[in-house]
Image (cartoon, rainbow, N blue to C red):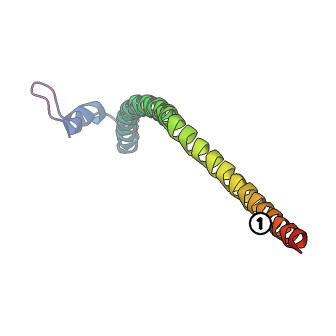
């Protein structure tokens, strides 16, 4: 019970109100007053929790915004890296294609040398 100096306690307050009432009426009034106080207490607690919930929702919104900004910055930072990786991969493909062309040209050169050698032998005979 909350005891405030100069103010009667709950039980004293209830006793003074219910002193002249019949016992069943006293009990009902006492229960009604206790229920009213409990209801007021719960309403106050509900209001406090609602304010706390609103504050937490605001924090969640702020943190979501910060996270979105961080993701955006990360994407921006990775763009040059991605460009370099894509550029290197493109050059690697180009090098592989050029190596295939070189192999084909070397095969042609080898055949041409064999043809020249064969022609030179035929001319010498």
Measured as percent of width and height from the top left, residue 46 is found at 41, 34
Query: Is 34 contained in the magenta span?
Result: no
Outermost front residue: 125
Where is residue 70, by image quadrant? top left
Outermost bottom residue: 125
Quadrant into which the N terminus falls: top left
- Measuring 35% from the left and 44% from the top, which residue is drawn there? 23
Q: Categorize mark 1 by other alpha carbons within 10 Å: few (<14), some (14-19), many (20+).
A: few
Relative depth, front residue between 103 and 121: 121
Quadrant into which the C terminus falls: bottom right
Measured as percent of width and height from the top left, residue 112 is found at 82, 62
Q: Secondary structure at mark 1?
A: helix
- Measuring 81% from the left and 69% from the top, which residue is drawn there? 117
Characterize the magenta stretch by its predominant secondary structure. loop
Measured as percent of width and height from the top left, residue 108 is found at 81, 61
Relative depth, front residue between 94 and 100: 100
Vertically, is 116 above or below 47? Answer: below
Relative depth, front residue between 49 and 123: 123
In the picture, measured across the screen, residue 78 lies left or right of residue 38, that is: right
Relative depth, front residue between 113 and 54: 113
In the picture, measured across the screen, residue 90 lies left or right of residue 84, that is: right
Q: Which residue is mark 1?
A: 110
Question: Which residues are the magenta region?
Answer: 3-8
Outermost top residue: 6
Measured as percent of width and height from the top left, residue 52 is found at 38, 32
Vertically, is 3 above or below 90? Answer: above
């Amino acid at each position: 019970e909350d005891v405030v100096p100069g103010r009667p306690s709950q039980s004293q307050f209830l006793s003074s109100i219910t002193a002249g009432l019949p016992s069943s009426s006293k009990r009902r009034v006492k229960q009604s007053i206790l229920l009213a106080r409990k209801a007021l207490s719960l309403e106050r607690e509900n209001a406090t929790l609602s304010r706390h919930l609103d504050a937490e929702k605001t924090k969640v919104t702020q943190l979501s915004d910060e996270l979105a900004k961080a993701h955006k910055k990360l994407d921006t930072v990775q763009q040059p890296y991605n460009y370099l990786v894509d550029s290197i991969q493109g050059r690697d493909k180009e090098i592989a294609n050029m190596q295939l062309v070189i192999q084909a040209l070397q095969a042609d050169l080898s055949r041409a040398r064999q043809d020249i050698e064969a022609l030179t032998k035929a001319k010498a005979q």
